[in-house]
Image (tube, coloured by chain):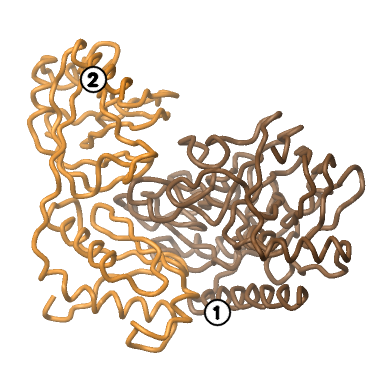
Amino acid sequence: MSDQKSLDIKALGDSAILIKLGEGIHPSVHQQVKNLSFLLDEFPFDGFIESVPAYNSLAVYYSPYLVHQSTHGFQTDGTPLEKVIHYINTLADQISDLPVTEGRVVDIPVLYGGTFGPDLHIVAETHNLSIDEVIEIHTTPEYLVYMIGFAPGFPFLGGLDERIATPRKLTPRTSIPPGSVGIAGKQTGVYPLETPGGWQIIGRTPTDLFVPELSPPSLLQSGDKITFYPITQQQYDEQKKVKSCQ
Amino acid sequence: MSINVLNAGLLTTIQDIGRTGSQKFGVLVSGAMDSYSMRIANLLVGNDEREGVFEITLFGTMLQFEEDTLIAITGGDLQTTIDGIPVANWRPVIIKKGSILKFGFAIEGCRAYLAIAGGIDIPVVMGSKSTYLVAGIGGFKGRALQQNDHLSFGQLTKSNDKVFTRIEQQGTPDWAVPHHPFISLASTQTIRIMEGTEYQHFDGASKQRLVSEPYVVTPQSNRMGLRLEGQALSLTEKLELLSEGVTFGTIQIPPNGKPIILMADRQTAGGYPKIGQVITADLGSLSQVKPNAKLTFKLITHAEAERELIAKEERINQIKIGIQQKLQ
């Protein structure tokens, strides 16, 4: 940002800010979110706690007390908020200089339909498609992971084909098993843990999306790309078995 | 074994300052609801202020100690007794081997904090000992305490030893940390807020109601959020928000117009409009309100909120210095 334009920064209370880097859901806006998050991790200010990327915004959590006490790294006197905003605007001047980073591509196997995907036929019927067509449409795109949230390891994905966008269930299920792959409107995603939920469940993956013992605990991260591919019951069982032996 | 849970009570979990650094993986911060009480409990026994403590909710918890230990209880007044004798909060106390610590019903506040010298010997998961109930992570086996659980204490540090020896020689001190500068335990509360990120999108009448009408904390409230009953609040026009970061004390307004204040176990992101934000300095008091309590909100500026927070941190520093001086 050579024109020194200030970022759109709003206070999220006295200990966090929300930085908006654009409108809507676009890979280019998300790239800016990722770049700023990367810069903050590389060049944290005194009192920085963590940053959390979302679709077009970055939340930055910090300790105002440590910012208040800090005597270096900040160019201005002023309130903790003023010091943080100044620091981030200076840092953000470098955003556009960063190379575009390519996230990892993660392939996720899915056993579609049957008892593991009880709503697959609803998606097919809603759009007058065959089951195989729905599976093909769902496994074609490369989805971008915009954010992880709602539950540990739960990916918010962009890129679902409108032809299979399907409204949520009118009555949410009280419990959705881990690994369930679902569709809600123009979103698709995978439930890492058992939770209640209203998404249309079209299949299940044997892949673990959240393992607290691992570092990082989440298989997916903001900026990763994922594809789904169909597997058979036998392949599902084998992958589950391999995991239980590990 | 060092402690035996005779009765877990309504909800007793282990909490510390919270699990930060993993929100980008969807991992909740958790941590003590009233972190001022939690931090002071730790300081009173010579622990690091961020150490894990027991968070005891409303009533019923009974613990038997299997060796002599130094403890401190802060937060709400749950009419605590040791072997039937009332025990004073907000000061270090020695509890003898075999004694039973019992929490009665909360007469003031909602949550008590029990710190034990040396801390609690449980694994640190993603940088924290806090119990993350929904995911079953952290704390004691990822869950609330149950009857017959056995928990061990950590090793005493020099600082723990110093307090322990001092109290052993001189008995329960005649001083205590006053809680008033940090939290209020009153049954009706005025909670200070600042404008939320979508404040300007609410209509004038709603902005007015927010700071003039009382709101009642419903029994559906928990560690995740306080659900409030009162005048509904509405936007000037419908807002389509994408999910974005939220934090402890964020007041969001779902479509029914009834405020929800996000608390320690909040999700990492939310998509409802945020009308306000409770100032950090008042989160401890807010965490001490019981169901059916009445809240009134008072709007202050961001700079005032920062000054309040800094003033409380400086008071905590004074406590640290004060305790050190008493031990010399």
Q: Residue furthest right?
A: B85
At 64% from the left edge and 51% from the top edge, which residue is drawn? B53
Q: Secondary structure at mark 2?
A: helix
Q: CA separation, marks 2 and 1?
A: 56 Å
Tell me which chain appears orange: A
Tell me which chain appears brown: B
Percent coordinates x, y for residue B312 in the rendering? 62, 74
Determine crowd level at label 1: few under 14, some 14-19, many 20+ residues with C-alpha closer than 10 A. some
At 73% from the left edge and 43% from the top edge, which residue is drawn? B58
| Residue B104 visible from this viewpoint | no
- Looking at the rendering, which quadrant does residue A144 occupy? top left
Percent coordinates x, y for residue B44 in the rendering? 72, 63
Which is more toward the observer, B250 or B324? B324
Dot 2 corresponds to which residue? A239
Viewed as shown, does residue B146 lie left or right of A186? right
Which is more toward the observer, A69 or B229? A69
At 33% from the left edge and 54% from the top edge, which residue is drawn? B244
Q: Is residue B80 above or below residue B10?
A: below
| Residue B275 visible from this viewpoint | yes
Q: Is residue A92 above or below residue A166?
A: below
Determine crowd level at label 2: few under 14, some 14-19, many 20+ residues with C-alpha closer than 10 A. some
Quarter of the image for the C terminus of chain A: give it: top left
Percent coordinates x, y for residue A16 in the rendering? 41, 66
- Chain letter for mark 1: B
Q: Identify the amino acid type marked 1.
A: Arg
Q: Secondary structure at mark 1?
A: helix
Viewed as shown, does residue A219 lie left or right of B156? left
Q: Identify the amino acid type marked 2.
A: Gln
Viewed as shown, does residue A164 lie left or right of A41? left
Q: Which mark is residue B307?
A: 1
